[in-house]
Amino acid sequence: MNRKLSLLFSVSEAAPFIKEGGLGDVAGALPRALEARGHDVRVVLPRYYAIDPHRHGLKLLPGSLVVPMGIIGDLYCGVYEGRLPGSDVPVYFLEHEAFYGREGVYGSGNEGFRDNDNRFVFLSRATLELCRMLEFTPDLIHAHDWHTAAVPLFMNTIYRHDQYVGKAASILSIHNMQHQGNFYPGLMDVLGIGWEHFTFLGLEQENQTCLLKGGLYHATKLSTVSQGYAREIQSPEFGWGLEGVLRERSGDLVGIFNGVDYDEWNPESDPFIPAPYSAEDLSGKAICKLELQRRFGLPQRADLPLFGIISRLVEQKGTDVLAAAIHQILALDVQLVLLGSGEPWAHFYFGDIAAQYPEKFGCHIGFSNPLAHLIEAGSDFFLMPSAFEPCGLNQLYSLRYGTVPVVRAVGGLNDSVENFNERTLGGTGFTFHSLTPAALFDTIGWAAWTWHHNEAGMKALISNGMAKRFTWESAAEKYEQLYYWAIEKKLGEGFRTRFPEE
């Protein structure tokens, strides 16, 4: 199908304006790829304090947007307009000082803001009111995670007869099931949709108002960011209490793998690494390894395998399992470098490990994009022992950089990394299943043994991985198919009438 669609993304973050995680990458890249396929795509998100209108060339639209907030009453916001870089995709930024004029996106430190319920109900309701202000009639609105899960809920209730959005289909994409937007029951009065929706088959979850649950029930179709994660979240281990809802709606749930910006992540042209290289000529990778060792104060040894980690230091990423295994790992003939931040205990713990093993372990608490690129280029292996991983991006960067992933076989990691076969020399990395220190150590030991003793195997792993591609063009094509499917479900025969076959 080549029918042009009008699409609106409602998101809490979008790169390069503001990014906290993988959602920001999706919201920054997917609309551009959809626009390239001929669709009218627009994005709406908050104008957080960190988003400088002057730096991004934003223009303030005339007038104010009135946003009804139930028992709170009407609130007002200004609307800035900009463009996604490298595209003509309009981005609308909602300015409301009381909700977004502060440091932080979701919280401060490791604590979420106490008014996150109102902040993101406001974003969801403002998304729909913005369509009226712009006189924009979308064919489909694409909401993401709990932060805008109220969008399909509003569309099916208060706005079901609205002239601008009443006939629009909706998609709710799940980027992380762990975070569900659970708040006090009285949030129902802010939503203003009626307490009849506060039931076990509605928004009620353990006597709280669960925004994600409401979105899961009301969205026309559902998606998540890998096929593996789409299966996993229907189980108690990964569903976080909503697995029953997802099983109920499994016929409307699809997994679509994220893409990679290969203009940014390309070892042949990466400006952050000291020497370019390719699958045909890996000599530059050896130079990157020596520079990485130097940057972390490690001995510059080409005769040891170097493992890299770039991660949030939280339980989801397997930080506790890595901590439990680290002494045993460093007893091997390996070096390891870590870049990340997260829970305070991890900052102190891995800092102490670096002091105990100055010739084997380097640690940088915080984040640095240039250093992240250098770790991808200079490491021999990339480590991701995640408890769960909806999609994952660093393993995809690693494949492109000839850095062999060592991952737990969950979610998107299992979908994108094929376990090494020593007999056929097939595969692109090393995988393990049990989230235990022993399983992690054994798999790292297998990888290290392969590096030291199986030269043909290492060459095959690097070559196989560097040949893989996960593009946004491919992802956009799949999302396009999902959008047509959702619109046809919403409109039925009316869809074919409105969009005649070409």
Image: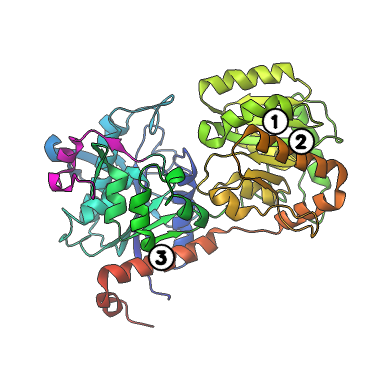
Count of marks overlaid on the render: 3
- Residue on which the image places disc 3: 482
Q: Are marks 1 and 2 in contact (CB under 8 Å)?
A: yes
Give the side of residue 457 with respect to residue 241, left or right.
Answer: right
What residue sits right under mark 2 in the picture?
Answer: 306
- Give the mark nearest the N terminus, 2 or 3: 2
Which residue is more in the foreground, 21 or 223?
223
Q: Which residues are magenta?
A: 180-201
Residue 183 colored in magenta in the image: yes
| SS at circle 1 | strand
- 70 in magenta: no
Q: Tag 3: residue type?
A: Leu
Q: Please, is residue 375 above or below residue 130 in the view?
A: above
Ranked by sequence position, the earlier of labels 3 and 1 is 1
Mark 2: amino acid: Leu
Q: Is residue 14 visible?
A: no
- Residue 328's place in the image compared with 443, above or below, is above
Mark 1 — residue? 337
In this rendering, position of residue 315 left or right of residue 424: left
Q: Which of the marked residues, 1 or 2, is nearer the chain's N terminus? A: 2
- The 10 Å Cα crowd at callout 2, few under 14, some 14 to 19, many 20 or more, is many
The location of residue 467, given as percent across then percent down, is 71, 59
Q: CA distance from mark 3 to mark 1?
A: 40 Å
Three-letter code for the amino acid on which mark 1 is drawn: Val
